[in-house]
Amino acid sequence: MNDSKAAVTADMPHTVKMTEKQPILSVRNLKQYFKIPGGNVVKAVDDISFDIMPGETFGLVGESGSGKSTTGRAVIRLDEITAGSITFDGDDISGKLNCDVTGRLRSNMSMVFQDPMASLNPYRKIIDTIATGLDAHFPHMNKKEREQRVYAIMDRVGLSSSQANRYPSQFSGGQRQRVGLARALIMNPKLLIADEAISALDVSIQAQVVNLMKDIQDETGAAYLFIAHDLSMVRYISKRIAVMHLGHIVEAGLTDEVFSHPVHPYTRALISAIPRCNPSTERVRKPLVYDAEASGISYTEGTLHCVTETHTILATQRQYEEWTK
Ligand SMILES: Nc1ncnc2c1ncn2[C@@H]1O[C@H](COP(=O)(O)OP(=O)(O)OP(=O)(O)O)[C@@H](O)[C@H]1O
Ligand SMILES: [Mg+2]
C-alpha cells in the first residue's frame, strides 16, 4: 500500500477538497448523546464530520439505529447538540442562536421528516401546513399571494390545488410525503434534509419523487442531505455518500468510488446485500455478514485514513492495511 494514501489527516474529516467553493454545510466532530432512564447514555452520533457543497446531494446511509435521523435533526438544530460545530451558509449554528441566525436557518434549511403522518398536524388544513414557512417569515403577505405560492409548490410536487383545504388524514401516504416536501420547499431552501423521504412510498412512486427532487434541485440549486437505507436510491441521487454505523461515519467518498471499491467491512456487507438485476449474478450472490461485536472493531480507536483524496475510512492503521491489501 502506498504510504501517502494512508495519511491520517485530522483536518480533512470525510470532506472533499475538489473545488474552491465553500461548503454550504460543515459539520465537525458532532456528538449527540441522549441520557436515558437508569443513568445510561445513548451515543446516537459520536464524533462525525462532513461537508456538503452548494447544490450537491450528499447521501447518508446505514442500518436502522445508526444515527442518521439524529444527525439530520442535530444539523437543523431540533435538538441541543452535545458537542461539535455546525456551520451553515457562513453562520455558526452550533451554540445558542440569536434571532438573526435563527431566522436565516429557518428560511434557508428545511427538512422532510421520516414519518409524514407524525410530522403533519392532523387538525391543520394542508394549505396552512405548507404555508408554515411563509407565515413565519412573511406574516404580512396577502392572502391571495400566500395562496398562489402554496398552489404553485403543490403543483410542483404533483398535488392538485383543489386538495389544499383537506386534512392530512384525507391523503394517501405518498401524497402526505409530497405535502412534507412542499412544506420543505416553499421557502426555496439552500439545504434540504430529506430523512427517508421516499422510503414509505411504492417503488414506482419512489422513482417519481426522486426524479422530482432532482428536477427541483436543477432549478433551484438546493443542496440535499439525503438520508436513506435503500442504497440503490441513494446511489442514484447522491454525488457523495457517507456510511454510518453505531453513530460513526465509517466510510465516505464519491458514490461511484464507494460502490465500486468499498473498503470498510460494514460497507462491503451493506453493498453485498443489494439484490442484483441480473438473475444469473443474483443466483450466486453471497451477502457478506458483518458482526461489529464479533469483529472486535472499536470505532473509537479508529482514525481517518484517505484511500484517495475523496475517499475516507475510519480505521486503525492495522485495520486499514489489512482492508486495503
Ligand atoms: N430522543 C432520544 N432519546 C434517546 N435515544 C434516542 C433518541 N433519539 C434517538 N435515539 C437513539 O439513537 C439511536 C439512533 O437513532 P436514529 O433515529 O438516529 O437512527 P436512524 O439511523 O435514523 O434509524 P432508522 O433507519 O430506523 O430511522 C437509536 O439507538 C435511537 O434509539
Ligand atoms: Mg431515521
Image (cartoon, grey):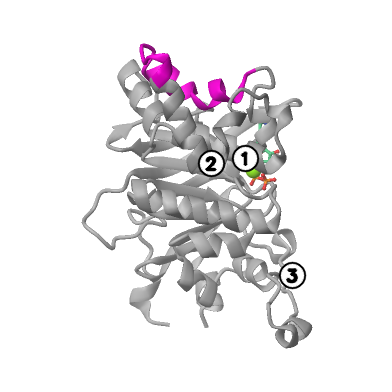
Residue 10 image-quadrant placement = bottom left
Neighbourhood count class around disc 3 (C-alpha, 10 Å): few under 14, some 14–19, many 20 upward: few
Q: Position of residue 175 (x, y in %)?
A: 65, 40
Nearer the N terminus, badge 3 or badge 2? Answer: 2
Nearer the N terminus, badge 1 or badge 2? Answer: 2
- Residue numbers of the magenta segment: 124-144
- Mark 3: which amino acid? Val
* Picture quarter with the N terminus: bottom left
Tell me if residue 74 can be seen: no
Neighbourhood count class around disc 1 (C-alpha, 10 Å): few under 14, some 14–19, many 20 upward: many
- Mark 2: which amino acid? Thr
Q: Position of residue 314 (x, y in %)?
A: 51, 61
Disc assigned to residue 289: 3
Q: Which residue is mark 1?
A: 177
**Which element is circle 2 on?**
helix
**Which element is circle 1 on?**
helix
Hey, which residue is sitting farthest front in the picture? 162
